[in-house]
Amino acid sequence: MNDIIIVGSGPAGHTAAIYSARAGLDTTLFEGWMAGGIAPGGQLTTTNEIENFPGFPEGMTGPELMATIRKQSVGQGVEIFTETVESVDLSKRPFKVKTPSREMEASAIIIATGAIARRMGVPNEDKFWQKGISACAVCDGALPLFRNQPLVVIGGGDTAMEEAMHLSKFGSMVYVVHRRDELRASKAMQERVLANEKITILWNTVMLDVGGSEVLEHVVLKNVKTGEEFKQDAKGLFYAIGHNPNTVFLDDQLDLDETGYILTKPGTTNTSIPGVFAAGDVQDKVYRQAVTSAGTGCMASLDAEKYLGENPL
Ligand code: FAD
Ligand code: NDP
């Protein structure tokens, strides 16, 4: 039996694994196999340059960063299986974890399965993904490609407002495309956006497609009230239409919020079941950064180590 099983292979899972193995705990990590359509290594494997992860002043690509972090896990003695966890049994200790190839037991479990940014799925989206289209303005907004250019954000929630505010520092104008005539975002965020002269909200508007030659040059929009279709110049397009946390395999055994994120006790990584911890984007819908995921991965390992010390099997 393992001391700790970690499910998930982004910065949260690997940081938890490195800390657990260094603490002398018998640690196994399931990195998934195209879990949720994403390669082992998580969301960073879907992007290019990472310029805000400390320690790499020249930047590094997402896949390189995750390969480096994985190497550190292996070097610390973490056993890694390239398998997706299909189900867990958290009803009693030892907890059970099942993949298509094996079933394993552990005294403690860390869930670090991340989340997936929702996409619009318009016809030419794949052609311009990462060539103007991004799901993370905080990550990509400062790139030279977007400086003094018209930028578009899709969505009307808090993320869309935060992204628009952030992008207004770089773009010539930020157009927030929202499908209704009322924002979902909190009042305070709305007020900040409405007062920003570099943000224009296109109400009752949906996006039909994107276009350009090598990189994104425009989006095709439609006003749902008037039926008018029009092109809007855009060098950057940022999706802020929500994320789907990877929690379906938990089968409601842990307390989740109304959108499927794992609920943790504030200031800890404790879930509703003692001995089960959660780290990274699967329990964080606000910060969603590699470094914050790594930070909570560290917390989960320390919380689990303490728990195992106090509750030996
Ligand atoms: P994730 O990275 O989401 O990884 C979890 C992974 O676990 C999954 O992807 C999958 O491979 C695996 N998994 C899922 N389910 C299972 C299962 N059932 N069994 C086994 N394995 C499973 N952040 C930054 O700080 N800087 C950036 O520049 C930056 N750029 C980004 C660009 C893009 C396009 C995107 C989408 C995100 C970007 N982010 C960036 C955000 C960052 O990627 C995330 O905050 C971070 O990766 C979250 O880490 P995580 O460990 O919680 O999980
Ligand atoms: P939300 O689900 O709150 O908002 C998503 C937005 O995208 C909505 O306005 C929705 O429109 C729109 N949308 C969804 N699907 C589509 C689609 N297919 N086409 C067009 N528009 C679409 O997600 P967020 O990521 O904004 O926020 C998630 C949670 O995180 C919230 O609880 C939020 O408060 C919180 N958060 C808090 C922050 C903070 O406090 N600083 C920062 C970021 C997030 P509609 O409104 O019509 O449904």
Image (cartoon, helix red, strand yellow):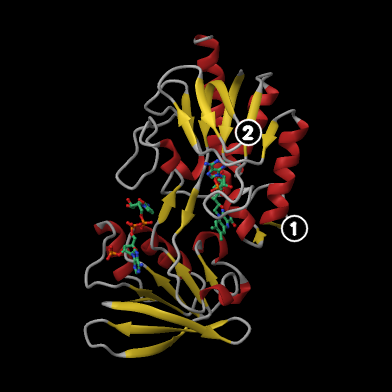
Q: Residue under label 1, please give it.
A: 58
Image disc number at residue 255: none
Q: Mark 1: which secondary structure?
A: loop
Residue 226 placement (x, y as % from top left): 23, 88
- Left or right for 185, reference 132: left
Badge 1 density bin: few <14, some 14–19, many ≥20, Cα 10 Å = few
- The CA span between labels 1 and 2 is 30 Å
Residue 1 placement (x, y as % from top left): 61, 17
N-terminal-most mark, 1 or 2: 2
Residue 117 placement (x, y as % from top left): 47, 58
Do labels 1 and 2 touch, CB within 8 Å?
Answer: no
Residue at figure coordinates x 22%, y 73% from the top left: 181
**Residue 303 in view of the camera:** no
Most extreme residue toward the right is 75
Residue at figure coordinates x 60%, y 19% from the top left: 3
Q: Residue under label 2, please give it.
A: 29
Q: In this view, does 137 lie above or below 100?
A: below
Q: Mark 2: which secondary structure?
A: strand
Total numbered labels placed on residues in the image: 2
Q: Quadrant of ligand 2?
A: bottom left
Amino acid at pointer 1: Glu
Mark 2 beta carbon near ligand 1 (under 8 Å): no
- Left or right for 13, reference 21: left
Badge 2 density bin: few <14, some 14–19, many ≥20, Cα 10 Å = many
In this view, the residue in front, 85 or 20, is 85
Q: Is residue 216 above or below residue 290?
A: below
Residue at figure coordinates x 39%, y 70% from the top left: 154
